[in-house]
Image (cartoon, grey):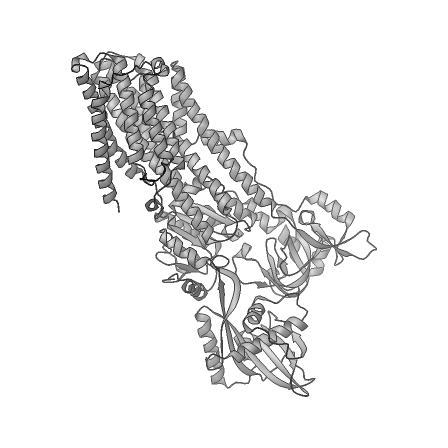
Amino acid sequence: MASETAEGTTLEVLRRLETGPRGLTESEAATRLAAVGENTLPDRRTPSWPRRCAGALRDPFTAVLLCLGLVSAAVASWGTAVVILALVAVSCVLRASGEHRADRSLAALRELVAGTATVLRRPDPAEAPEPREVPVAELVPGDVLRLGPGDLVPADVRLLRARGLTVHQGALTGESAPVAKRAIDDDAPDEHRLCFQGSTVASGSATAVVVATGTGTRFAAAHRVPDAPRAGGAFDRSVHGISWVLIRFMLLTPPLVLMANATLRDRGLETLPFAVAVAVGLTPEMLPVIVTTCLARGATLLARAHAVIVKRLPALHDLGAVDVLCVDKTGTLTQDRPVVDKALDPDGRDDPEVLRWAAVGAWWTLQLAELPAPDALDEALLEAAGAVGEEYDGVDAVPFDPVRRIATAVVRGELGRHTVVVTGAAESVLERCATPPGEHDRLLALAAREADAGLRVLAVATADRAAGARTSDARGLAFRGLVTFRDALAPTAAEALRALADRGVTVKVLTGDHPATAARVCRDLGLDPGEVRTAAELADGPGEATVVARCTPEDKARVVTALRAAGHTVGFLGDGVNDVAALRAADVGIAPRSAVGVARESADVVLADKDLTAIGHAITAGRHASANIASYLRVTLSSNLGNVVAMLGAGLLLPFLPMLPAQVLAQNLCFDAAQLAFAHDRPGTAALRGPAVLRPRSFLRFAVGFGMLNALADLATFAVLALALNGPDAVDDEAVFHSAWFTENLLTQAAVMLLLRTGRREGPGRAPGPVGLAAAGLAAVGLLLPPSPLGSALGMTALPAAYYLLPAVVLGVYALALTAARTRQRRRQP
């Protein structure tokens, strides 16, 4: 509908819109606003709290815990049910609150994006129109508005008049250079006469009529694209891989316990609460809570310290796992403005005089051509040449014309003479110069050589003319030389690239620019571009190429997908509508606050500025959180597996249950509470150097190896207790056994927390960290709870002093074995 409205001659467009060059009246605008609605994009609905909490149940561990809690309630094991269901509730609330905070932060960022537009409105049809500022939301089709440098195009518009108009529309097309627009009705495609919402005026001025607003714009079309389901990120894949292996064990544990006790000990359904408690004991039931706490804490610190908003909490872990970061060149590695590189005479030698004449032309074009602001090349020339141009008297100037591709300035020379200064594209300037055919080709080759080196080239020519001679299309010029420009580098880009490389992150540049331009920027930043490839050459993915040039939006998404298929965890930084597909295809989509709305909403992480340094901070925060999650998993999986194996073995050998269900749950509750300290641990530097990936097989191998060591320690404790109670046949004091094993289990778990973590080690003169304090607290509970009144309520009793001596020896031997095994395991790690 919008494109149909914009087609045809200017007069036909105005007639279809029932408007004219004088714009609408106030009453007409109000009527149309009521009919078509506000010029806004539809907001994505924020999920309600119940929906957020229900979404948290998709986590496999949370769902299984809920089932175990319901089973416990069904068999009237109310203590077990209450503890399990409380863990489920805490996990859901923490996850929902973290996502809610991220949405609130993003909403605050959206409120910063507001604006007005200058439109021609008149109170009455007979009165002259007056320009006035109105909110962008109140624009309607048929409004006539004015555009100037720096203005955001607030709707889809058709140009009525334009002067030197160029527009940045990279948000829609990915083009880094401004695109020339004109209002002339000719055979050129309508795209040359249209400007689209989301574009920015780079130079020139225009009057235009609004042809589409709100949901009718091209910008809104991106919002209407149905959200493609995001493939599971690195975090989801890792945690789900670990989860489902453990869930299978958990589902097998209760029937195995029931069958073994029924067969060997003639105990039937009365052992069901114990079987459920053992299954819960195998579960890292605090995983949802620990994960959510670690990620929410990291996201909160990122938002406060670096204004980085994490919209999807698991994306913080995925950031820590990123090993390939795909970025655009413009605005990320460069500042989207050129700077002068060098000035060359016709022989290719440095010549400051060429720069001086180019700057004179830029100065007087600015002064006489009534341009509201210099274009990017003019600014670069004037900045590099300093104070030049004022020593002449300007006579006339013709600004750069995208069709003729030259700009002309005329200054007063000697008495009765004028000097004409022409700058522009090498081909256009040389065809106006008096050069022999061979020289003409040589100079074109010189310009081509500089362009192939990734530089933009401006040719400069002058001519001496009699005062009053026609100079608007001067010929027979004397070729002065070339001025070359390179992209101004982002101030922090080089340092940020080095920091990312130190963290094991490979940066790939996906750009729509010329390959040589992108390669030049990489070399200037110290990033080896390697073999630069174009998107058309990517039949099998980017391979080892650092730079992929001439990329369309589809090419960017294809490159990201290929990198993920090759086993990489990919982050993508984008800010335009053309980046949406790649943002959704990446493990982590990253967008700056200044990005278009659909890009921000498609991203997982929103930056205050388009700055690689902020991404480096976010990656570090992600690895910090992931290292703490990994510590928790190593500790809890190995400890739980060892306890369950020992408990099953003891249950088959003892004439009574090795622990009462309430004691199992109390032990798990104490251990779980202590492990909350992992969310506040301080990872060592080694854990932050490389991508943080939770590999299921690695964790399961770790759990089996150290779990069996833990089981041996538990069974050795069982043997010691049997001897302490006057031989294996005399172990009939259930309360003493339960109390001693309860204490030993909590002490070994405290040792495991300290020895298997990835955080910094406690040392002399250093205050104990949160994990050290939690381990000390856990050990204190293990020693003090059995003789307390609460211990009596749980079926435990105080132990004589002699009963602590032999288990203490076992604990010491276990700690030495654990330290030796952990040291050997670290040495074997790559």
Nearest the eye: 215 or 790: 790
Query: Against 257, is 391 above or below?
Result: below
Does residue 731 appear to the left or right of 89 in the view shown?
Answer: left
Query: Against 822, is 399 above or below?
Result: below
Q: Residue at 35% across / 56% down in the picture?
A: 543
Report x, y in % for residue 153: 63, 55
Total numbered labels: 0
Which quadrant would residue 370 be assigned to in this image?
bottom right
Nearest the eye: 726 or 504: 726
Which quadrant would residue 42 be assigned to in this image?
top right
Question: Is residue 97 in view from this perspective?
Answer: yes
Does residue 372 appear to the left or right of 288 in the view shown?
Answer: right
Report x, y in % for residue 299: 47, 41
Report x, y in % for residue 646: 24, 24
Q: Residue at 50% across / 36% down in the picture?
A: 99
Does residue 468 appear to the left or right of 725 in the view shown?
Answer: right
Report x, y in % for residue 443: 48, 80
Q: Residue at 44% across / 74% down in the picture?
A: 449
Q: Residue furthest front?
A: 765
Question: Is residue 8 in view from this perspective?
Answer: no
Nearest the eye: 753 or 98: 753
Which quadrant would residue 707 be assigned to in this image?
top left
Query: Against 747, is 205 above or below?
Result: below
